[in-house]
Image (cartoon, grey):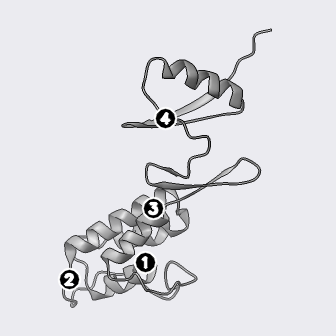
Amino acid sequence: MWQLKLIGILTGCDDGFIIGKSEDFIVKFLSSLSKELTMKYKRKPTQHLGYRLDWKTNNSVGLSQADLIKKLLHDNDMADSKRVKTPCNGNLMIEIDKKGEVVRVNSYKLSVGSLNHFAQHTRPDIMFTVNKLSRFSTKPTTTHWTALKHLL
C-alpha cells in the first residue's frame, strides 16, 4: 500500500536541511538526490547557517546563536561582561535625550540590528527592549548606549 511521506526541506545557498518523521524515507530521498548532485550528509548536524543545533533525546531540536552573540559582545568590548536577569531595567524610561551627546551611531545601529535578528530568530524575550532601543538609532546618546549595554 502506498503511503504519503512528508519531509521539510530548507535551503540556503549551498546548505540544506531536511526534516521528516521517516528516517528511512529521508535516506532514500538523499540517495536519489545524490545521483544528481554532489553532496554530504550528516545525520544530526550541530551547526546550520549560523545556528547551533542542540539535539534532545526526544528528537526535538534546540536552536541558539551563541557564537554570533559572543561576536557581538566582543565587537562592543563586552566579552567579559556579567549576565543580568532581565533584558531591560524595569524602571528605565528610554526617551529622546536632547541634551545628551550623540555617540557611535554606526556601532549602535549595527548592534541593534544584530539584536533584532536574534530577537526574531532565537531570543523573542528581548524583542520589546530591542524595539524600544531601535527608536533611537539616528541619534543614540550615552543614555541609549547604557540601555543597550544592559541588554548585551
Quadrant assignment, res 79: bottom left
Residue type, numbered disc 4: Lys
Image point 41% across, 58% down: which residue? 117
Which of label 2 and label 1 is nearer to you?
1
134 and 60: which one is in front? 60
Q: Secondary structure at mark 3?
A: helix
Identify which amino acid the numbered label 2 is placed on: Val
Who comes first in sequence, dot 2 or dot 4? 4
* Residue marked by disc 4: 40
The residue that disc 1 covers is 152
Q: Where is residue 60 drawn, in percent x and y?
A: 69, 49
Residue 115 x/y as whole percent? 40, 66
Residue at screen point 38% across, 76% down: 73
* Residue 47 coordinates in the image, percent (x, y): 50, 52
* Image depth: mark 2 or mark 4 in front: 4
Contact flag, marks 1 and 4 (Cβ < 8 Å): no
The mark nearer the N terminus, 1 or 3, is 3
Q: Which residue is mark 2?
A: 103
| Amino acid type shown at disc 3 | Phe
